[in-house]
C-alpha cells in the first residue's frame, strides 16, 4: 500500500492502487463540493436539472445511470458509470478510491460500496484511513442492503444476495451471498425464465 499521500492526494485517490493516509490529510473541500451537489440532486425532480448535477458530480457519467432518492457519496469524482445503472433508494458510495460500475448494473436499496476503511490496530485507527477501489463488472446485481468492501471486484453477470457483506472478489456468472459473502452456485441456462 502507498502511504505517501500528502502531496499528490488527488492522484493517489484516483489511482487503482490501495493506499493509506492520515485522516487529517483528506481533502475536505472536495467533500464539501460533493455535499452541495448531493443536496441539490436530492431536492430536484426535473430530469434535465438532475442530469446536469450528475454530470458535474461523477467522474464518468452515463445518461442511463439513475441514482434514486437518498443517494450519498464522499466525493463523486471517483465514481465511474460505464452504461445503464439502476441505483435504488438510499445507496451510499464511499468513493475514497475509484468505483467502476459496469453496464447493466442493478443496485438495490440500502447498498453500501465502501472503498474506505481504517487501520486495524487500535493505536492507529483514529489516525489512519485505508482505501482500495471497487469494481462491478457488466450486468452485476446487488441485492438490498449489500455491503461491498474496498479492493473487491464482482465479476460480470453475478448476483449478490440481499444482506451480504462482500470482502473478497466474486467470479463472473455466479450467485453469491452471506456474511462473509461466498459463491453459492453458477448461473446456468436453467435460470432462464419460461415466459
Image (tube, rainbow, N blue to C red):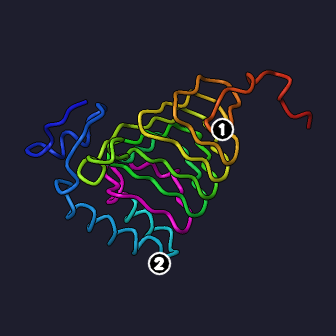
Q: What stretch is highlighted in magenta?
A: 55-77
Position of 177 with respect to 52 (left or right) is right
The answer to whether 66 is drawn above or below residue 115 in the figure is: below
| Membership of 65 in magenta stretch | yes
Q: Circle 2 sits in a helix, a strand or a loop, which is it?
A: loop
For residue 173, which numbered disc appears in the image? none
- Give the mark nearer the N terminus: 2 vs 1: 2
For residue 160, which numbered disc appears in the image? 1
- Which of these two is toward me, 179 or 68? 179
The answer to whether 134 is drawn above or below residue 143 in the figure is: above
Q: Circle 1 sits in a helix, a strand or a loop, which is it?
A: strand
Position of 31 with respect to 9 (left or right) is right
- Which of these two is toward me, 84 or 126? 126
Q: How crowded is mark 1: few (under 14 residues within 10 Å), some or many (20 or more)?
A: many
Q: Residue 121 location, x and y as percent? A: 33, 42
* Residue at x 52%, y 75% (from the top left corner): 45
- Res 34 visible: yes
* Residue at x 55%, y 33% (from the top left corner): 138
Q: In which quarter of the image is the C terminus?
A: top right
Q: Which residue lies furthest to the bottom in this view?
A: 43
The answer to whether 173 is drawn above or below residue 38 in the figure is: above
Q: In which quarter of the image is residue 15?
A: top left
Q: Residue 9 location, x and y as percent? A: 16, 45
For residue 43, which numbered disc appears in the image? 2
Q: Please name which of the two marks, 2 or 1, marks the residue nearer to the observer.
A: 1
Q: Which residue lies furthest to the front in this view?
A: 123
* Residue at x 37%, y 46% (from the top left corner): 117
- Which of these two is toward me, 41 or 151? 151
- Magenta stretch prevailing secondary structure: loop
- Res 97 visible: no
Q: In which quarter of the image is the N terminus?
A: top left
Amino acid at each position: 500500500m502507498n502511504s505517501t499521500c500528502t502531496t499528490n492526494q488527488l492522484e493517489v485517490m484516483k489511482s487503482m492502487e490501495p493506499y493509506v493516509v492520515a485522516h487529517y490529510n483528506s481533502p475536505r473541500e472536495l467533500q464539501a463540493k460533493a455535499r452541495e451537489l448531493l443536496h441539490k440532486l436530492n431536492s430536484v425532480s426535473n430530469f434535465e436539472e438532475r442530469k446536469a448535477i450528475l454530470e458535474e458530480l461523477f467522474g464518468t457519467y452515463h445518461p442511463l445511470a439513475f441514482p434514486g432518492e437518498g443517494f450519498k457519496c464522499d466525493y463523486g469524482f471517483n465514481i465511474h458509470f460505464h452504461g445503464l445503472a439502476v441505483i435504488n433508494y438510499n445507496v451510499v458510495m464511499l468513493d475514497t478510491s475509484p468505483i467502476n460500475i459496469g453496464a447493466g448494473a442493478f443496485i438495490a436499496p440500502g447498498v453500501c460500496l465502501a472503498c474506505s476503511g481504517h487501520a486495524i490496530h487500535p493505536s492507529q485507527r483514529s489516525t489512519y484511513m485505508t482505501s482500495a477501489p471497487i469494481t462491478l463488472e457488466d450486468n452485476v446485481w446487488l441485492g438490498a442492503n449489500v455491503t461491498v468492501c474496498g479492493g473487491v471486484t464482482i465479476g460480470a453477470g453475478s448476483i449478490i444476495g440481499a444482506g451480504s457483506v462482500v470482502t473478497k472478489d466474486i467470479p463472473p456468472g455466479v450467485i453469491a451471498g452471506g456474511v462473509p459473502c461466498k459463491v453459492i452456485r453458477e448461473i446456468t441456462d436453467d435460470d432462464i425464465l419460461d415466459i
